[in-house]
Amino acid sequence: MISEKEFLEQYDPGKYPRPSVTADVAAFMVRSSESGDYKKDSEQRLTLLLVRRGGHPFKDCWALPGGFLQPGETVESCAVREIREETNVAPVSLMPVGVFSEPGRDPRGWIISNCYACVISEDSVRQVGGDDAADAQWFEVDFDRGEDGLYLLDLTWQDVSLRAVLREEKTAFGTGFFHIEESGGLAFDHARMIAAALTALRENARRIDLIFDFLPETFTLSQLQRVQETVMNISLLPANFRRKISDYVEETDSYTSGAGHRPAKLYRKKQTEKGEEA
């Protein structure tokens, strides 16, 4: 009987066909736009970072930032490297969304992609764009279920409008699997990835913890509420929301400032006795 060392010395890594592996990142940010009325808060919009592909396949189509796994990398470190190279955005953390391995998903061959989602604070982003992609832009996101049961994914930036149509199939453990009916001009199967990432993002936003990643270190309670409403596409009663998040935030000694606005108390994520965030 041979030892494990002997087995490994004799093992042929080419015995089984091996796929290429990629990582793609759905980076979301809640962006503010002025309402035009100084008495009202700025409007909040959920946005998604897309890159326009500079080469084949799907040349000039919009896609999630991503690329191929390199030797010595983890899939997660590949995801971080790719989004930095293509967009100059550096995510603080990544949330796994799923593995996409359907045969034929990439015309270049057998390529399996790992999709991640991340949330980016608006104050941490100055300019997007990188060396590997022809363009990078934040698209406003709308994702809703239509009367016919199909999901409509609308992505808009200036005069560019992408609309994908997806059908959801419920699978085991309460999870959903999206099938693309119309890609809407998105490359590969990225419409599926975005739908899955949005679903996961909304579900996680219910736990409160995730929404702090959309905000600067200090924020108003109204800002916090608007972020959760924007991410989850819902409306919340202020009194109920403030009661729900009271265990997660603490007051600071600072207030907002700005002409035409009544100063509002600033808060931050609550710190534990050990100095860790709650």
Image: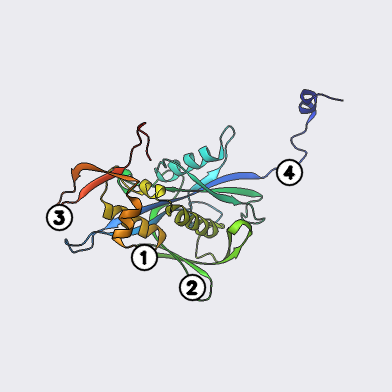
| Amino acid residing under circle 3 | Arg
Q: Earlier in the sequence, mark 2 or mark 4?
A: 4
The amino acid type, in three-letter code, at marker 1 is Asp
x and y percent of residue 72 in the render?
Answer: 58, 32
Q: Is residue 165 above or below residue 201?
A: below
Number of on-image labels: 4
Other residues around mark 3 within 10 Å, as few (<14) / some (14–19) / many (≥20): few
Q: Quadrant of the N terminus?
A: top right
Residue 210 in the image: x percent, y percent? 41, 48
Query: Tag 4's secondary structure?
Result: loop
Figure check: 231 above or below 271? below
Give the label on residue 159, or none: 1
Left or right: where 264 falls relative to 175: left
Tell me whether the residue at label 1 lies in contact with that at label 3, contact meaning CB atoms closer than 8 angstroms.
Answer: no
Q: Earlier in the sequence, mark 4 or mark 3?
A: 4
Give the alpha-carbon distance from disc 2 to disc 1, as whole Å.
24 Å
Mark 4 or 3, which is nearer the eye?
3
Tell me the residue that label 2 is attached to. Answer: 146
Dot 4 and dot 3 residues touching (CB under 8 Å): no
From the image, tell me which residue sits under label 4: 17
Image disc number at residue 181: none
Please give left or right for residue 18 compared with residue 242 in the image.
right
User: Residue at the spot x=48%, y=52% of the render?
Assistant: 64
Disc 4 residue type? Pro
| First of labels 2, 1 by sequence position | 2
Q: Position of residue 89 (x, y in %)?
A: 39, 44
Disc 3: which residue = 262
Alpha carbons under labels 2 and 3: distance apart: 40 Å
Please identify, in this view, whether the residue under mark 2 or under mark 3 is nearer the observer.
3
Disc 2 versus disc 4: distance between alpha carbons? 42 Å
